[in-house]
Image: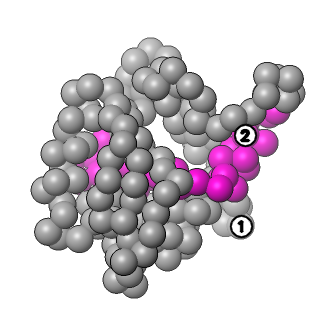
Amino acid sequence: MDLSSPWLQADLIQHIQRLLYSFQHWTGYPLINISDNISDRLSPIEVANLLFQADFVIVSHGTEADPILNYGNQKALELWQMDWQTFTATPSRYTAEPMERSERAQLLAQAQAQGYISNYRGVRIASNGDRFYINAAIIWNVIDQDGSLWGQAATFKDWQFL
């Protein structure tokens, strides 16, 4: 495994394709804006790099009973102040403070039932204890083209430290 670019592993490139597919499936628009002329020529690896380097946050977790984060782009790693290995070994509930976790769980259940929710606002916590407010987040079920559930993901571009 290339530890300098772990998001380029084959299983994560597939996961990124599911993130892109399911976001468009639920919302009707693409997660990343790539012109049609360019998108036809981009390889899955190039798309994975674009997503990892995007100027907005993208995170996802799996379907475990206590879901573990399985993807975070560079903005997410910076915001939560973790490296890739730490981030992708963290239960996703730890992205919120203990008092915020029941609200977060209700939100995820709502997204699970509806497919996605938009305009979520809430407080999250970085690994060093820094708190930040996220605004206008979209949370969606990560599915493949067969409709199988692979987890949930979130994206947002508006945050401020408290």
What amino acid does circle 1 point to? Ser
Residue to which mark 1 is pinned: 4
| Neighbour tally class for label 1: few under 14, some 14-19, many 20 plus, Cα within 10 Å | few
Pick whichever, 126 or 83, lies toward us. Answer: 126
Residue to which mark 2 is pinned: 47
Residue drawn at (79%, 28%) of the image:
35
Q: Does 85 sit left or right of 108 as displayed?
A: right
What is the x, y in percent for residue 114? 26, 25
What is the x, y in percent for residue 66? 23, 53
The residues colored magenta run 42-70
- What is the quadrant of the C terminus in the image? bottom left
Q: Are marks 1 and 2 in contact (CB under 8 Å)?
A: no
- Give the alpha-carbon distance from disc 1 to disc 2, as whole Å: 17 Å
Residue furthest to the top? 146
Residue 151 highlighted magenta (yes or no)? no
Residue 147 visible, this angle: yes
Q: Does 125 sit left or right of 42 as displayed?
A: left
Q: Does 89 sit left or right of 101 as displayed?
A: right
Residue drawn at (58%, 36%) of the image:
31
